[in-house]
Amino acid sequence: MSHYLAIDAGTGSVRAALFSADGVFRGAGSRPWEHDPEPGVPGSMGFATERNWGLVVECVREVLESTGVDAASIRGVAASAMREGLVVLDAEGREIWACANVDSRAGAEVVELQGVQTPDGPLLDEVYRRSGQTFALAAQPRLLWLARHRPELYERAATVLMLSEWVAYRLSGERFMEPSNGSTSGMLSLATRDADPFLASACGLREDLLPAVAEPGTRIGSVHRAAAEATGLAEGTVVALGGGDAQLAALGLAQTEPGQVLLTAGTFWQLNVNVGAPLTDPDMAVRVNAAAVAGLYQAEAIAFHPGTAVRWFRDTFAAEELAAARAAGRDPLDVLTEAAEAVPIGSDGVIPIFSDVMSYRRWTHAAPSFLNLSLEAGPRLRAAMFRSLLENAAIVSDANLALVGRFAPVAADAPVVFAGGAANSAAWTQITADVLGRTLRVPAVTEATAQGTAACAAAAAGDFSSPGEAAQAWVRWDREVEPDPHRHEQYVPVKERWATAYAAQRELMLSGVTTPMWSAPGA
């Protein structure tokens, strides 16, 4: 049987996942990795290319060994990666500088670029209109930092790759960029899905730093001898372009049509709405990326740390529930969720501020807080606080969806695909359906990003006409969850109270009274 290999270079780990010809997950190898602060450079997070390539090699060898699959049966390999991470190559193909997505060394450059005025207005506005990106996480400030602080490296720079493309380069020796991950660099035009020289030159950068651009699922070469010897893959195996992890997750769940909505609910809750044209938000509240499907785009709004917040609450406040769960051999989060289900809608008036509605122009978050707590301590208060965290994630996602709907068409009748760890919780899924007032479709697929990446490899190998065709053939669904109309109406005043409290808490943060949960570089 034929197989396809997906390599995912994530923020905290790298994985190699193997799929059979019918899209069935066969196994994976994984390794954690860390990113290296550069001595004397605050906010820096370098990406150790040689060390991390060694971990990629280990993952590939592990999955081949654990599955017993003959490398000769692997028809193609593609890579996905965290967005925004960069690798800079010199003319000879040597990696001379690299950083992870969490690198924030270029805060001063972000502020500087945000302050640039052009004859037509702020440079930031024009960059966003063209690229869908601000400077907060984009490549331009980091490359400008490189030019100023490591000029000898900048002078040698020949090619900038995203991390998914760096994996493909290591396998094949070919330098390409693709739009889904490449768009998060801020150096590609949304309209053309290709390099835009203005987006470099207007920021004081050379215009020749990007390689040729091709779509996800394009065959760019094959595994060369050195990579084959290192990984155990067969020399000549097709190497395809993959893309950004979030966009490939949408592809893996067959979200390939305009108007479709994907809500991925894990540590962060990431809302992606497919858009059929390169539209941007007049208020610059929402990020817009190229999708992993030609001619398709994604409006993206992120709720930070809903998953983190429930784990933090468990470990900080729920000692009694933790002890009871351990005694019963149960998951403490299940015990907390059962208690929360006994609390009515609105969480006994507790108002949680633990995630912010997307505000891309000035991307900074209010301080985490619980408001309107009762002084009656005990299990009931803890249950109300925990329920408020579940509601908070859904309320912020609902507000983010409304932001997108102001400038882009959202399919009114299509289910919202609800994926990620929170989809395993029946209670949290129902709360989310009730808050949104929309049907949620929960996938059976648990490896969406890897499956979307494998779909790119399958298309490049010629086994499907496109990655989207492979994804449609492979996707499987677990269940649909319907909203309760009465509960949806009950949530209307709850959302209004939350919005009023949230606005006040954000003002406290902006005035310096409280400390933001997170701020983007330059915010």
Image (cartoon, grey):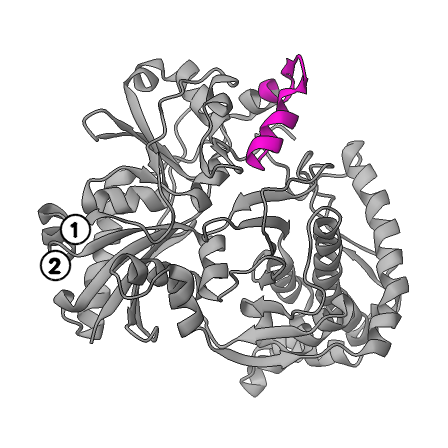
Point out the image quarter for the N terminus: bottom left
Q: What residue is rendered at 12% in x and 66% in y? A: 72
Determine whether, in the image, residue 209 is placed left or right of residue 77: right
Within the image, what quadrant is residue 148 found in? top left
Determine if the magenta segment contains residue 127: yes
Amino acid type for the residue under numbered disc 2: Ala
CA gap between label 2 and label 1 equals 7 Å
Determine whether, in the image, residue 2 is placed left or right of residue 192: left
Within the image, what quadrant is residue 3 found in? bottom left
Amino acid type for the residue under numbered disc 1: Val
Tag count: 2
| Res. 260 visible in picture | yes
65, above or below 505, in the image? below
Residue position marked by numbered label 2 in the rendering: 234
Determine whether, in the image, residue 522 is placed left or right of residue 404: left
Instruction: Tell me the element at label 2.
Output: loop
Residue 12 pos. (x, y %): 42, 51
Region in magenta: 112-134
441, above or below 185, in the image? below
Q: What residue is rendered at 49% in x and 28% in y? A: 105
Residue position marked by numbered label 1 in the rendering: 223
